[in-house]
Amino acid sequence: MKKMHYIDNKEFEKTIKLYLKDPKTHEDSLLNMFDLLISNIIESFNFTTDKEDAKQECFLLVLKTLKNFKPSKGSAFNYFTTVIVNNLKLLYTKDKRYRTKINNYIEHITGESNRPRTIPDPNDDTHTEDNQKI
């Protein structure tokens, strides 16, 4: 069977309704759909956070917000895409703020202000072990 790279919104909403009625029977199907949606969003927006951590955070959030979804107010795809993107923005902002604080602290301790970033972006493959640009 060929793996799908998109989510059929009607099937997604149907699976959500079935899951809310009988979670054990429809859990795998719904989690596969969320996995696809979350993975596609993370790859599309290319947020510079740890992708696996971000994915786990998004899974927790969508499972918490699942009960809040109302089909009469919009499509499942739009609702959960908004939830996931907003969460990724928050994670990115927190991660960036943390790295800035660490770098500022290191600069303060060492007295070097024009030093290259010592806490590299976790997804940046353009640096070597000693943080030298490739």
Image (cartoon, grey):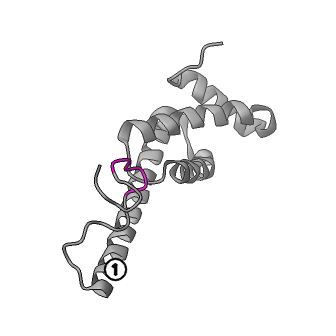
Q: Quadrant of residue 122?
A: bottom left
Q: Position of residue 39 (x, y in %)?
A: 51, 37
Q: Position of residue 22 (x, y in %)?
A: 78, 36
Residue 119: tell me if it is visible.
yes
Residue at screen point 32% across, 70% down: 100
Q: Which residue is mark 1?
A: 106
Which SS class for mark 1? helix
Q: Position of residue 19 (x, y in %)?
A: 71, 35
Residue at screen point 55% across, 32% down: 36
Q: Main secondary structure of the magenta part?
A: loop
For residue 115, above or below residue 33: below
For residue 24, above or below residue 127: above
Q: Is residue 124 magenta?
A: yes
Answer left or right for 38 relative to 99: right
Q: Quadrant of residue 16?
A: top right
- Looking at this view, is 6 or 110 the one in front? 110
Q: Dot 1: within a 10 Å radius of its alpha carbon, few (fewer than 14), some, or many (20 or more) residues?
A: some
Residue at screen point 80% across, 32% down: 25
Residue at screen point 54% across, 34% down: 71
Q: Position of residue 101 (x, y in %)?
A: 34, 75
Q: Please give the range of residues in magenta.
A: 121-126
